[in-house]
């Protein structure tokens, strides 16, 4: 008598079912989180604008590039948001090994991006405890605001990240981060650009276009010096810094009153790209 062949089982084992269910749960969790993020921030724009910056501004922001028109995503834009998050990580890396950080406001463009800064042998570094003292060392000091207010004045911002130097009479500039808000007419709106330089070399950037907006992104930074500021006692000076957020649809409303009087509250909740930077991280 011929034996009946044994039938192969094609079902799943209990362990396989558990693994499959676990993967399904992870996929569903990610999908729900992504959907929630989209619902909170609104639909991301996939529209690109050809924004005319003018040849002088275009060349100043992007170095050797020539032209005047740049293609940029309209806010809210998740591609620009991803680039901004990458730059946030780069800023954290730079500050983690910095010996000094100074934020200076600008109304125009920066004409020089040095990799080192010379100073005289009679300079007492202990006196360089605020942005204005650092400004005095720069050959292009006129590019930056001379206002002594704790609110960093100007529509634009430069962040100097200083590293260790082997020269007793020279400061080493590890990187310079620049934020520029350019009001444009064609098309009407505000072009926001945040860039990182090593000397004159552009290494990283993100940008976004806010259509039909006026530039009200102010202040871009606020300085807390050593002492008592706004009823807060500070032993180690630091900065509050904001970058324009590509994930939001519009810029914050204009601040009321004097921006020197704690007007940084105008920026509360207006950008997810918010930083607290110690002036002297190594201390």
Image (tube, rainbow, N blue to C red):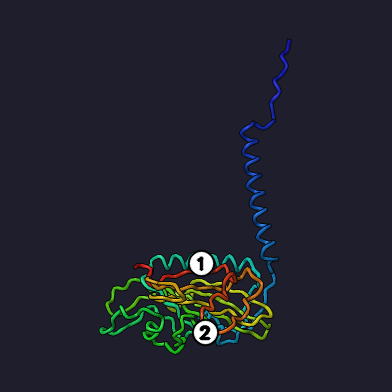
Closest to the camera, between mark 1 and mark 2, is: 2
Which residue is tagged 1? 88
* Quadrant location of the N terminus in the rendered image: top right
Q: Is residue 205 visible?
A: yes
Q: Give the quadrant of residue 42.
A: bottom right
Q: Is residue 126 above or below residue 146?
A: above
Query: Which residue is pictured at 62% across the width and 84% down the height?
Result: 183
Task: List x then y, in percent, for residue 154.
Answer: 52, 84
Query: Which residue is pictured at 28% across the width and 85% down the height?
Result: 120
Q: Nearer the viewer, residue 146 or 226?
A: 226
Left/right placement of residue 182 relative to residue 125 reads right
Q: Is residue 75 above or below residue 60?
A: above
Task: List x then y, in percent, for residue 48.
Answer: 67, 73
Disc 1 residue crowd, few under 14, some 14–19, many 20+, Cα 10 Å: some
Decide: marks 1, 2 in contact (CB < 8 A)? no
* Quadrant location of the C terminus in the rendered image: bottom left
Q: CA distance from mark 1 to mark 2?
A: 22 Å
Is disc 1 placed on a helix, strand or loop? Answer: helix
Q: Residue furthest bottom?
A: 142
Q: Which of disc 2 and disc 1 is earlier in sequence?
A: 1
Left/right placement of residue 273 relative to residue 73 reads left
Query: Which residue is pictured at 28% across the width and 76% down the height?
Result: 167
Query: Which residue is pictured at 44% across the width and 88% down the height?
Result: 146
Q: Give the quadrant of residue 271.
A: bottom right
Disc 2 residue crowd, few under 14, some 14–19, many 20+, Cα 10 Å: many
Q: Nearer the viewer, residue 12 or 263?
A: 263
Task: List x then y, in percent, for residue 254.
Answer: 61, 81
Which residue is tagged 2? 154
Q: Residue furthest front?
A: 231
């Amino acid at each position: 008598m011929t034996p009946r062949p044994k039938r192969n089982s094609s079902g799943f084992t209990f362990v396989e079912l558990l693994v499959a269910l676990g993967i399904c749960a992870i996929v569903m969790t990610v999908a729900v989180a992504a959907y929630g993020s989209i619902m909170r921030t609104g639909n991301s724009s996939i529209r690109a604008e050809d924004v005319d910056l003018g040849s002088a501004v275009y060349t100043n922001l992007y170095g050797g590039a020539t032209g005047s028109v740049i293609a940029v995503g309209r806010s809210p834009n998740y591609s620009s948001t991803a680039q901004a998050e990458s730059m946030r990580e780069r800023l954290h890396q730079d500050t983690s090994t910095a010996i000094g950080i100074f934020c200076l406001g600008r109304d125009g463009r920066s004409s020089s991006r040095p990799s080192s800064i010379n100073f005289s042998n009679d300079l007492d570094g202990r006196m360089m405890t605020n942005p204005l003292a650092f400004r005095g060392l720069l050959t292009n000091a006129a590019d930056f605001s001379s206002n002594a207010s704790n609110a960093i004045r100007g529509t634009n911002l430069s962040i100097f990240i200083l590293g260790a130097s082997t020269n007793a009479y020279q400061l080493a500039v590890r990187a310079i981060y620049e934020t520029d808000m350019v009001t444009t007419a064609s098309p009407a709106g505000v072009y926001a650009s945040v860039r990182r330089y090593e000397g004159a070399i552009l290494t990283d950037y993100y940008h976004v276009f806010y259509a039909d907006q006026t530039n009200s992104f102010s202040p871009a930074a606020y300085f807390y010096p050593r002492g008592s500021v706004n009823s807060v006692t500070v032993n180690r000076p630091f900065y509050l810094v904001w970058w324009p957020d590509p994930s939001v649809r519009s810029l914050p409303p204009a601040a009321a009153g004097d921006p020197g009087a704690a007007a940084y509250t105008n920026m509360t909740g207006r950008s997810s790209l918010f930083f607290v930077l110690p002036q002297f991280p190594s201390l």
